[in-house]
Image (cartoon, grey):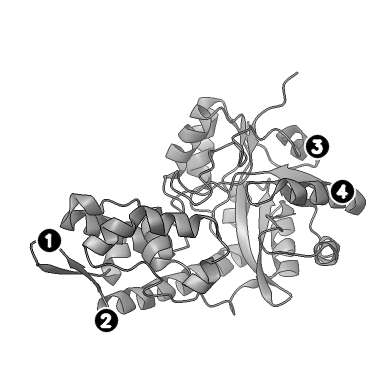
Amino acid sequence: MTNPVRDLHAHSNCSDGLFAPAELVRHAHHSGVDEFSLTDHDTLAGVQEAEAQALSLGIRFMPGIEFTCRFAGQTVHVLGYGFRPTVAENDRRLTAYLDRIKARDHAWARAMCRRTCADPLVVRTPDRKEHTVCVQEDELAWVRGTMPSPFHIAVVLAKKLADVSDELEIPARHCMYLFTGRPEPERQGESYWPALRERYAHTLAHYGLEPHAHWWTPHPTAELLEVQDAVQMIERIGGIPVLAHPGEQELTNPQIGQLVDHGIRGIEVYTFKHSPATIAELESLVESLGVFATSGSDFHDPHHRAQVELGKDREGNSLTRGLSLDGFDALDAYISR
């Protein structure tokens, strides 16, 4: 019997993805995904829409969320799986926390918008006209859910650049990397960055634009939950806590062991963010710690730096390893019927 294709980590436009929840599920269906979870950052806004679309298409669906947490002086991500949406949405402590994060993120977005307007991009067209481009606060009114991000700034920016010239029709994700994302010193280790700069070098130079983090504004972290508090939050609504992509945060094996002691029950092992060597190491660690492994693409949109498809790994192979939804069902997780 063939293992089902599973993707238990994906983002909609309720956090920092491109597609609406229902549209994302349709993309998953077209990509051959059999088992799916929507795991938007710090929001439940898209879960019911995604669930309804999955049920209509015959995809098995498990509600999810990705908490941004503090641990050992850094940020880590904890996935919460298998809670009943109505239970989560009626949990006052959870919704109060998510509302605080939403307020924090929207305040951050307003501050970054003000910076874009104080120091706008200046686009010089071949006819020697100058166009100033920035993002006004009210131009983010369409953002859903909790997490306005540099990507949302870039969505507006991409449209405005394209309005100046067809030659500046650059995907929003690439605009984020080029103009609104992390500062260059943090990107030097990213394989996509040199290729992206080279790809757009001629066009940007033609219009007098320079690729770098023009308005970098770090997200504050004081409001974030500590990992153990996020775990308790997930468990209280009947969910199962799983550590997301520990290789990206460069967590050591002892640190991962500490997180398991805090209540983490699974580790996302099979993801494009992990090299084959990291996957092999994590497979051994999962076994020694007595937890389970999961699969997820961490899909945001087709122009993401990973260039990974829903339900696929970095080599384009289907994600079929890790705990299936039958396995989650055996752990008393809620699976949509």
**In the orientation shown, which residue stands out farthest toward the right?**
288
Residue type (three-letter) at the residue carrying disc 2: Ala
Percent x, y of residue 147 = 47, 63
Label 3 crowd (10 A; few <14 / some 14-19 / many >=20)? few
Percent coordinates x, y for residue 236 in the rendering:
72, 58
- Quadrant that contains the C terminus: top right
Sequence order check: which comes first, mark 4 or mark 3? 4
Q: Secondary structure at mark 1?
A: loop
User: Looking at the rendered structure, which numbered label has been put on residue 126?
Assistant: 1
The reply to whether callout 1 and callout 2 are in contact (CB within 8 Å) is no
What's the residue at 52%, 73% (across, down)? 185
- For label 2, the SS is helix
Nearer-N-terminus badge (2/4): 2
The local secondary structure at tag 4 comes to helix
Which label belongs to residue 284? 4
Q: Which label lies toward us, 1 or 2?
A: 1
Which of the marked residues, 1 or 3, is nearer the chain's N terminus?
Answer: 1
Instruction: Name the amino acid, label 1.
Output: Pro
Residue at image coords 71%, 64%:
250
Q: Which circle's residue, 3 or 2, is located before the other in the chain?
A: 2
Give the mark nearer the N terminus: 1 vs 4: 1
As measured in the structure, the alpha-carbon distance from the residue carrying label 1 to the one carrying label 3 is 64 Å
Label 2, label 4: how many angstroms apart (C-alpha)?
51 Å
Look at mark 3 in the image and give the residue it sits on. Answer: 330
Q: Secondary structure at mark 3?
A: helix
Mark closer to the observer (3, 2):
2
- Which percent across, then down, holds residue 114? 31, 78
Amino acid tagged 3: Ala
Q: Check disc 4 and give the amino acid type.
A: Ser
- Cα–Cα span, label 3 and label 2: 55 Å
Indicate the position of residue 283 as horizontal and vertical percent values: 82, 46
* Residue 179 numbered tag: none
